[in-house]
Amino acid sequence: MKKQRLTDEQYRKQVLDAPPSDKVGVRGFYHVQIVEPTGEIVGDSGWHENTVVNLGFNQYLVMSLGSIAGSKYLTHMALGTGAGPSAADTALGSEVGTRQALTVATSSGSKTLRCTATFAAGWHSSAAAFNISSIGLYNTVSGGTVFAGNTYASSGCASNQAVNTTYDIIMA
């Protein structure tokens, strides 16, 4: 199955400006950019839709609504070299480097939570460039349970390059 890549304009029209609906659901979209030390963007995934895993729905959404012990909230983002999580997974496959703390925001009346993280130059210890191709949202700096994630077209990332990420969780 080919992953659909949306441009910023397509994302705005199809997702952010979509008409309201009576259905209740959760959609997530992410965007990954590899940045040279000069600020030049040398890799851009475009916007892609995510997969919310089963425990993501249960522990991050359902349990949180009831303030049930063991509920989780988003705090970190991870990148990987392998496949994104399937619905039954609890972690991102082939995670690399150090997870980064999220900056989260929403606005009054919004149904969207925007999570951003910057993986600064040196975020991974590999001397050689390697390909990154997956992303995931977590509740802790290591271990924990993935909420959602997916894959994108693999891009080479050198240790002197930063990675900027944006991940929107939309309640619809």
Image: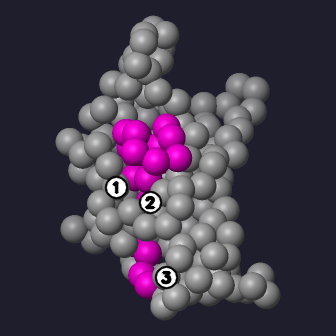
Label 1, residues with CA under 10 Å away: few <14, some 14-19, many ≥20: many
Q: Quadrant of the N terminus?
A: bottom left
Instruction: Specify the segment rendered in magenta.
Output: 130-149
Q: Which residue is mark 1?
A: 92
**How far apart are the two marked residues, 2 and 1, measured between alpha carbons?**
7 Å
Question: Does 20 sit above or below residue 79?
Answer: above
Magenta stretch: residue 148 in it? yes
Q: Residue 75: within the magenta?
A: no
Relative to residue 85, is residue 39 depicted above or below? below
The picture quadrant where one finds residue 158 is: bottom right
- Label 1 near label 2: C-beta < 8 Å? yes
Q: Which residue is mark 3?
A: 126
Determine whether the residue tagged by mark 1 lies in a helix, strand or loop.
loop
Side of 89 where 29 appears, left or right: right
Residue at the bottom extreme, as displayed: 128
Q: Nearer the viewer, mark 2 or mark 1?
A: 1
